[in-house]
Image: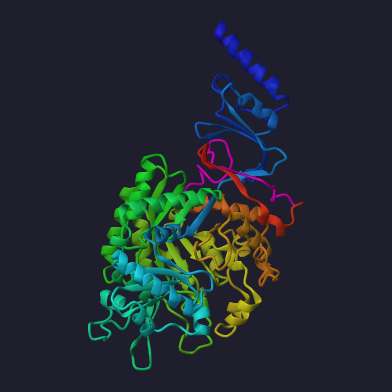
Amino acid sequence: MKKKLLQFAAVVLAFALAGCSDDKTVTSEVIENPADMVVYGTIYTVEDDAPQAEAFAVKDGKYVYVGSADGAKAYIGENTTVVDHRGKGMITPGFADCHAHYFMSEAMKAMGSLRFADFTAPQQLLVDVAVEYQKAKAEGKPGIYGFGWTYQLFEALGMPTIKDLDELCPDIPLYLSDAEGHKALVNTACLRKAGIMDAEGRLKITEIKGGEICVDELGNPTGLLLEQAGTYCKLRGIDFNVLLDEDKALETVANTRDALISKGYVAYQDGWSNYFGNLRFYDAAKALDKEGKLSLNLGMAYEIESSTEELDKDLESAFATAKYTTTHLNPHYIKFFIDGTVETETGYVQVPYLNPAKGNGIANWTLEDFKKITAQVNGNNYTMHVHAMGDLGIHLAVEAFAASGKKEMRNTLVHVRNVLDTDYKVMADNDIVVTSGFHWHFCSDIALENFRQTLPEEYVTKMYPIKSYFDNSVIMSAHTDYPALSGSSEKPFDMMEIACTGVMPGKNDKPFWAAELINRQQALKALTINGAYQMHSEKERGSIKVGKYADFVIVNKDVMDESCPVSQIHTANVTNTFFEGKQVYPTK
């Protein structure tokens, strides 16, 4: 009886301390078992019914209280860590990057691959290749992989030929991807190793579904490969099992984690997790999570190429990645390409390109085939994660998802450059998610004029919608597509500013499609709760709410307040990142 009276007195005292708190969760258990952490500040919860709070309390990695500053006092005990960020900036849920290629980029560093600086000229690329060849020969490397040259620039200044590359790198495979990952320059040794060319220099393969082996007027390869032809050659021409060993893969995943959490990302959907033709990133990510060192919510997508001749076998391999599932690793995503890119005239579009030879672009799959694939993938509890750029390519995927997909799988369209007006409702009705790269919503006047040389006007003035998704109740998340940033930054507040202004920070250009700009609240949703929805975790993450995991960031400036000009959003920086209530950046 005495113990019960003491407990009752403790509860009364707690309410007295809280004043006129709106808190309804204070119990004797709370008083006897206080929070691990209490945080005060300007808090944006991303919850519609209570979008702002003054404080929250965290216990065992989850929010146990969100509300007023007075109400949070009851959760403070002798060992509670108190963080007071009032008047110093803001606090938001941690961010989600819902499609990028950090593993690929970080692996290049680990492998010592060639990385071309922005707007490297063709002649400089050749100089870099010559240096890298000498290094590769000295180290006994089985091939050279590089990334980052700019297709439009090389088209204007002169594309290196296969003869140029052969003179500099005559006897080991050379594969150089462009900055978008949709074109490649290769030497003869790479074509031979991939089985595309024979020893006499004749092409053994002339057509690859979804791609193009470019040839000259005599039918000889130029060294330029487009879309799926490049992927086909890369996976067969370069021995990545040697270049990327288990230790380098583990280093890659750890470095990816560090890069993401330093910017405030606590969730990440990798867009192509078998990029180098093996499953070493899966092994590394699972090992890190088993050790409690993953420190973010991770989705991994197994890509299946449209050039495959063994689709059923590839699907079986993709489904087998289920064995990598851990607490924070969800491998239940399969990546497909519906088409190429509109800017390089390989996206599948309704209005033909200005160049008659390009027609309407490339459709990698028929509607019937993609319906069957969708049914099989969703039937095995995997989500479709689909690159789609042209309006007809997007329409094809939307029709397949609506006809054969499961709504609960939240099949996702990636990038999504042009959308037919009639497809928005179908997307919304079928829980089709779109992940959008905000940085592409900026386009300079120079780039627009360049596009006018190849694209119909409707594909120049209207591209990459974002506001239309909100207007039509389509769930839209945000992604960086890192390292394919088109000169932008992968920082979340840089991305948010572009979504709100249509202008890249530091540029003076005007937005090219002002009607599609969104407000900062919508941008924050896309970067947080909508990303959690895409990754099937919105009930546990993505907002600051009692019962959810405490994944949040502390920011040095309140850029959600209207007093901050939208042109200054990029000046905010994440100073601290917390994952499940523990500070993961900076490391203590």
Q: Position of residue 364 (x, y in %)?
A: 39, 74
> Residue placed at 45% from the left, 89% from the top?
357
Front-most of 192 and 372?
Answer: 192
**374 to 542, vertically: above or below:** below
Judging depth in this view, the residue of 578 and 375 nearest the camera is 578
Q: Which residues are magenta?
A: 536-562
Q: Is residue 403 above or below residue 260?
A: below
In terms of image quadrants, where is residue 550?
top right
Q: Who's the residue at 40% across and 42% down the image?
A: 327
Of residues 276 and 343, the one nearer the viewer is 276
Residue at the extreme left of the image, as rendered:
199
Name the spot of residue 531 as percent of width and height, x first.
52, 53
Of all residues, the one furthest to the right in this rendering is: 563
Which residue is nearer to you in this view: 517 or 192? 192
Residue at 52%, 44% (x, y): give it: 541
Q: Is residue 35 visible?
A: yes
